[in-house]
Amino acid sequence: VGLGGKEDRRPATLSGGERQRLALVRALASNPRRLLLDEPFTSLDLELRLGLCELVDGLQLSYGFTLLLVTHDPLEAVRLADRIVVLEPGRLVWDGPAEHFLSVKGESPAGLSQALERWIHPRPDAVQGRRK
């Protein structure tokens, strides 16, 4: 996972991306059948985000664990998921295959178009990372 030569360093001295990779390795150390990742790439720059997304995808394919990814990024969801579920304030708005997700806007069930619009283009008055 790209942490070779850093075995003797304390986690606090690692970069954000290195800490995320370390957390992923720790989570996978027990060879889980299921793994929950809650916003794992949020605080990372684009290059690290893409690299870790690719790493998670490769590890999931190699080890065969079920991945439950919580994200506010529709492109991450499409990249890593077989199935996507959209909840908007606690109610199910859409549930279906990832390959259909970005193409459903015109034929979506009630609420999905609005939810996607808010997801992709949050209002300027969103407070502390919460999208309205």
Image (cartoon, rainbow, N blue to C red):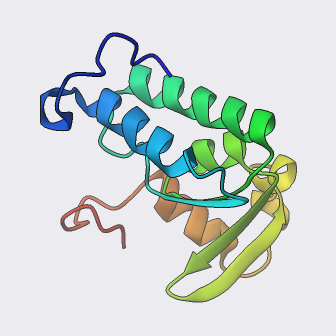
Q: Residue at x 72, y 41 (%)?
A: 60
Q: Residue at x 21, y 27 (%)?
A: 14
Q: Is residue 111 above or below residue 46?
A: below
90 vs 121, left or right, is right
Q: How many marks?
A: 0
**Looking at the image, which is closer to me, 68 or 65?**
65
Q: Is residue 20 above or below residue 69?
A: above
**Looking at the image, which is closer to me, 82 or 117?**
82
Residue 38, given in percent of the width and then of the height, sits at: 46, 60
Farthest residue toward the bottom? 91
127 vs 120, left or right, is left
Residue 132, given in percent of the width and then of the height, sits at: 36, 73
**Looking at the image, which is closer to me, 48 or 76?**
48
Residue 105, given in percent of the width and then of the height, sits at: 75, 59
**Looking at the image, which is closer to me, 30 or 68?**
30
Farthest residue toward the left? 13
44 vs 58, left or right, is left
Q: Residue at x 22, y 22 (%)?
A: 8
Q: Residue 45's image quarter?
A: top left
Q: Residue 55's image quarter?
A: top right
